[in-house]
Amino acid sequence: MILSLAYRMWRTTDARLLWKFAYDFGYKGMRSVQRFKKRLKSGQTFPPFLYISITNGCNLRCQGCWMDVTSPRTLLGFDEIDRLIVNAKKHGNSFFGLLGGEPFMHPDLLRILDTHRDCYFQIFTNGHFVTDEMAAELRRLGNATPLVSVEGLDTVSDERRGRSGVLDKTLAGLEACTRNRLITGVATSVCQSNFDDLVNEAWVDELIRRGVHYVWYYTYRPVGPEPSPQLTLEPDQVLKVRRFAMDMRNTKPIGVVDAYWDDKGQALCPAVVGVSHHIGPWGDIEPCPVIQFAGDTIRDNDGDVFKTLTESAFLDDFRKTTARLTRGCIILERPDLLREIVLKCGAHDSTARKTALAELGAMCPRSSQHIPGHELPEERWLYRFAKKHWLFGFGAYA
């Protein structure tokens, strides 16, 4: 299937885009992980992959959204984003995820990509602002992959995302991406209302037919001011998502991302491993996008984000305490313990609404991807090798 996927990508994208993906994301990404592992030996944790929510603005109102999309629109300014990326590049980073809100609502998005042609960007988007003109510009720049969020078929998509006609607009953006030969992905937050429609072979076949190159399935987490806990998956469904991702990766010419299990099939949290952290639209440094508490900002230490991250008491306590407790998601399994960490470290609420601590206190413990005794090891040697050496084999849970 790897050869089939490679052949399909060769036929549906430009050689220049493939080269930039292979070099800026692949080779340089592996090199940044090697530097990350070397730093770990000296007790420094600076993630090789940073995810940046560049705005809270969005045209949709999704169930379980953690972002303050109803608050006045806030943007991380170009100068701050530029300084952050420049600082991270000094320490080997070359890959950045750009999130929102809706990142295509940021007026300097293309300027960010153009300024940092030596980096690779994954843009998390609902697709509504991706026109042919925008996709053509992304193709010209060549250093970004749009990851288009699909949260259900017609009716479910409207219900999940708080607007009408959502799916048609999303698919129009998706088609603009593939028509302009971009390396294109589709992401789904799997929940009760979209499980049957999207976690199935027919849907993956449809994505392949539409020219999509990779999919990313992650499980729904009931957070934010309107958490919709009834959408949370049961443990057997989480295992089905894991099994399904492996089956599709083994049998279909499409990449399948599952970032919450290691090569042995053991659960993990990328933030606890230290491989990624999140920057909110107000400049706060958070463990991950759904944990909206921070002890530090990108403005601390005169903007030296490396110094700030490697010396962060809150992030250090979060990683160590969580690793001793579980390999899963602490906000699902032990929101009470996360609340204790926040209070102990004096971390601040990094939302605009300033109700995150109360929301955390109201959460009920739920199961996550950590289901001991039901591990599903990777079955293909190449993916197993890659996960072990360049993604998650870093000993955080030793």
Image (cartoon, rainbow, N blue to C red):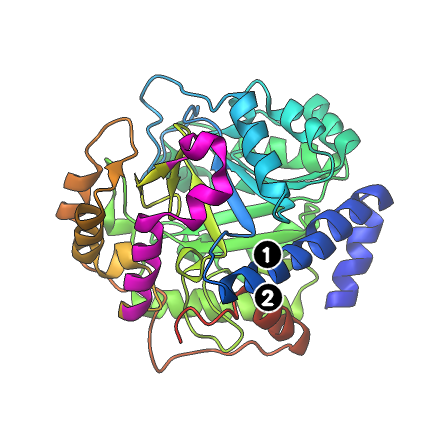
Q: Given the image, on which type of amino acid does mark 1 rest?
A: Val
215 w.r.t. 137: above or below = below
Residue 298 can be seen, yes or no = no
- Quadrant showing the N terminus: bottom right
N-term-proximal mark, 2 vs 1: 1
- What residue is disc 1 on? 204
- What residue is disc 2 on? 248
Q: Quadrant of residue 146?
A: top right
Helix, strand or loop under label 1: helix
Q: Which residue does the image show at 59% across and 28% down from the upper left?
A: 82
Residue 291 in the image, given as x and y percentages of width and height? 32, 45
Q: In terms of depth relative to the viewer, which is nearer, 279 or 226?
A: 279
Q: Quadrant of residue 181?
A: top right
Residue 215 in the image, given as x and y percentages of width and height? 58, 53
**Contact between labelled residues 1 and 2, with CB atoms less than 8 Å apart:** yes
Q: Which residue does the image show at 77% across and 51% down from the upper left?
A: 23
What is the crowding at mark 1: few (fewer than 14 residues within 10 Å), some, or many (at least 20)? some
160 w.r.t. 248: above or below = above
Q: Given the image, on which type of amino acid does mark 2 rest?
A: Met
> Real-space Cα distance between discs 2 and 1?
8 Å
Residue 276 left/right relative to 379? left
Q: Which residues are magenta?
A: 297-324
Residue 334 in the image, given as x and y percentages of width and height? 21, 59
